[in-house]
Amino acid sequence: MAILITGGAGYIGSHTMVEFLTAGRELVVVDNFMNSKPESLRRVKEITGKDFRFYEVDLLDRDKLEKVFLENEIEACIHFAGLKAVGESCEKPLLYYHNNITGTLNLCELLAKYGAKRIVFSSSATVYGKPASVPITEDFPTSTTNPYGETKLMIERILADLVKADPEWSVSVLRYFNPIGAHPSGRIGEDPQGIPNNLLPYVSQVATGRREFLSIFGDDYATHDGTGVRDYIHVVDLARAHLSAIEYAEKTTGIDYFNIGTGVGYSVLDIVHAYETATGAKVPYRIAPRRPGDIDECYANPEKAAKVLGWRAEYGLEEMCRHAYGWQSQNPNGYDK
Ligand code: NAD
Ligand code: UD1
C-alpha cells in the first residue's frame, strides 16, 4: 500500500518525500511541474537512495489521474499540489480557483472511489486573516483577504462537508505558518521563479549577492521593533509533521485542524540579524513602505499538534538560516544549472 503525494516536486513536497522514504514508506508521486522541476525529484532519490513511482499528471486531468489509482494501491494522500502566490491569485483568480479547487475535487472523488479516504491537506495560517490576538489556536475565527487564501478556506470547507457526509473519511488539515530553510544537505530547497515574494528566499539571494538589498516592508507595526512578526518553521520539521499526521490519520476518522508552527514569533529585523550571525554573510536592507495586506503579528500556539500528533518543531532559527544559506550558496540558480 502506497501513499500518494500530490505536488511532490515542490518545496515542501520534496522535503516530505525525503522524510517518508527515509522512514521506509512507499510513495506514489504526481506533479505537473507548473511550479517545480524534475531535478528536485532526482535529488530526493540521491539523498535517500530510495525509489518511488512518479507520474507527470495535472490534477485537472481526471482521466490521467485515475490511471495512477488503477496502477497502484493507494491507501492515503498528502495533498500539496496547488498554486500559492498571493499577488498572482489577485491577478488571475480563475486560474487559482480552477487549479486549487477543481484539482482537489478530482482528487477527492478518486480517493473515495478507490477506497483511500485519508487525506492530509496543506492549508495555511492565512485562513486566520488578521487574528484578533496571538498566539493563534485552531478555534480562532477564519477569514481571508485574497483568492489564494479563499481557495485554502474553501477546500477546508469541502473536506469538512465530505467528512459530514461520509464518516469513513479521515482528514487532517495542517495550517502551516511560515516554512523556511532547506534540507541540511543543501541539495533540495525553495526555488522561487523570478523575484521572490517571501522573506527568506529574498534574504538568501541578497546574502549571496544575487540581489543588492532587502526591502523591509514597514517599520511601524505594533511589534517589538516595528517590523512584521511571523512564526518561521524549518521545512524539515514541517515535513515530519506530515509523517505524524499520516500515522494519526491511519488510526482515526473525522476531521482535525492543526497549527504547524514553532510558537515563537520573529520580526523581519530579528531574521536579518540571525541570518547574518548564522552565516557570516551581510544582508543590507532599506526600510520600504508596508506591503498591502500584511499584518503585524502572526504566530501559532502549536500545542494541539504536540498533544494529538505527538509532533513538535525541533530546529531553531540559527539552523533555519544556515540551511537556507547552504542551499542558496550551493545552488545560486536553484535547480537550473
Ligand atoms: P510549491 O509550488 O513548491 O509546490 C506545489 C507543487 O504542486 C509544485 O511542484 C507544482 O508544480 C504542483 N502543482 C500545482 N498545481 C498542480 C496541478 N494542478 N497538478 C499537479 N501538480 C500541481 O509550493 P510549496 O511551498 O511546496 O507548497 C505546498 C503546499 O503548501 C501548497 O498547497 C501551498 O499552498 C501550501 N502552503 C505553502 C506555504 C509556503 O509558504 N510555502 C505556506 C502555507 C501553505
Ligand atoms: C506569506 C503569504 C501568506 C502565506 C505565508 C506563509 C503574502 C502576502 N502572504 O505571508 O499567504 O500563508 O506567506 O508562506 O505573500 N517581508 C519584507 N520584505 C520582503 C518580503 C517580506 O519585509 O521582501 C516581510 C513581510 O512584510 C512580513 C514578513 O517579511 O512581515 C514575512 O513575509 P512573507 O515571507 O511574505 O510571509 P507572510 O507575510 O507571512
Image (tube, rainbow, N blue to C red):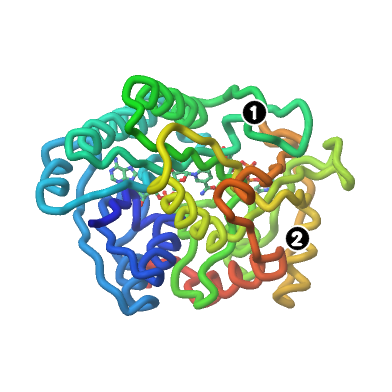
Binning the other alpha carbons within 10 Å of mark 2 as few (below 14), some (14 to 19) or many (20 upward) gives many
Of 288 and 181, nearer the camera is: 181
- Kindly tell me whether mark 1's CB lies below 8 Å from ligand 2: no
Viewed as shown, does residue 292 lie left or right of 61? Answer: right
Which residue is the site of mark 2? 272
Q: Vertical placement of 193 versus 119: above or below?
A: below
Q: Quadrant of residue 107?
A: top left
Q: Give the percent coordinates (x, y) of residue 151.
A: 44, 28
Image quarter (top left, top right, bottom left or bottom right) of the N terminus: bottom left
**Count of all numbered marks drawn on residues in the image:** 2
Q: Give the percent coordinates (x, y) of residue 146.
A: 53, 26
Which residue is the site of mark 1? 139
Where is ligand 2, by quadrant? Answer: top right
Binning the other alpha carbons within 10 Å of mark 1 as few (below 14), some (14 to 19) or many (20 upward) gives few
Residue visible at 26% across and 42% down?
A: 116
Image quarter (top left, top right, bottom left or bottom right) of the C terminus: bottom left
Residue visible at 28% across and 33% down?
A: 108
Viewed as shown, does residue 283 lie left or right of 93? Answer: right
Viewed as shown, does residue 177 lie left or right of 273? Answer: left
Residue visible at 57% across and 24% down?
A: 144
Residue visible at 34% across and 33% down?
A: 169
Q: Amino acid at mark 1?
A: Asp
Q: Give the percent coordinates (x, y) of residue 24.
A: 34, 70
Viewer can see residue 90: no
Mark 1 element type: loop
